[in-house]
Amino acid sequence: AYGVAVKSHNIHPGCFFDTANVSIGQRTVIWNNCYFGDGVTIGDDCAIARDVAFQTTSHEIASSRRRVGRSTTAPIVVGSGTWIGTRVTVLPGVTIGNGCVIGAGAVVTRDCEADGLYVGSPARRVRGLS
């Protein structure tokens, strides 16, 4: 898939890879219309629902003349066994621990500890999973 390091063939149509610097683990399933920025690593046995955005690029805030400033990037890491719901957005620099569930529509702005259920915008841990 576009030179991306894929160990699984479970990538559904309409996904966009902004770069070849994406790694997808074994037995991971990625549904339609997901976006992968530069520097995304997805572990083994993950389920990524439709319309998920792994956004590794942002911008600094600049002067009032033009607020969008210099571009910044930071990688995203998703641990093995994680399930990410429909229309989740994961922002630059986030690490999602192994075995997490990220609820539909969540905006993940900071790291998620392993084995947690995260929901909302910004995403917050609502309980542990065993």
Image (cartoon, rainbow, N blue to C red):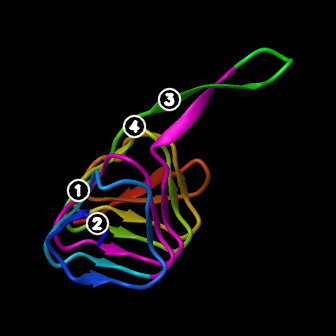
Answer yes or no: do the residues labelled 1 and 2 have beta carbons within 8 Å?
A: yes
Q: Circle 2: is it few (<14), some (14-19), or many (20+) Cα within 10 Å?
A: many
In the rendered structure, the answer to whether residue 68 lies left or right of residue 58 reads right
Work out whether mark 4 precedes mark 3 in sequence or the reverse, and give the earlier one. 3
124 to 15, vertically: above or below:
above
Camera-nearest residue between 83 and 42:
42
Q: Residue at x 30, y 47 (%)?
A: 113
Q: Circle 3: is it few (<14), some (14-19), or many (20+) Cα within 10 Å?
A: few
Segment colored magenta: 32-61
Q: Which residue appears farthest toward the top when viewing the image?
A: 63
Q: State the separation of the CA atoms marked 4 and 2.
A: 17 Å
Q: Which residue is mark 4?
A: 93
**Amino acid type shown at disc 4:** Gly
x, y percent for residue 112:
36, 47
Q: Residue at x 45, y 74 (%)?
A: 15
Work out whether mark 1 precedes mark 4 in sequence or the reverse, and give the earlier one. 1
Discs 1/4, front? 4
- Numbered circles on residues, count: 4
**Amino acid type shown at disc 3:** Thr
x, y percent for residue 72:
50, 29
Q: Which residue appears farthest toward the front when viewing the image?
A: 2
Q: State the separation of the CA atoms marked 3 and 1.
A: 23 Å
Q: Residue at x 47, y 70 (%)?
A: 34
Q: Which residue is mark 2?
A: 82
Q: Which mark is residue 72?
A: 3
In the rendered structure, the answer to whether residue 89 lies left or right of residue 98 reads right
Secondary element under disc 3, as helix, strand or loop, is: strand
27 to 117, vertically: above or below:
below
Name the quadrant of the N terminus.
bottom left
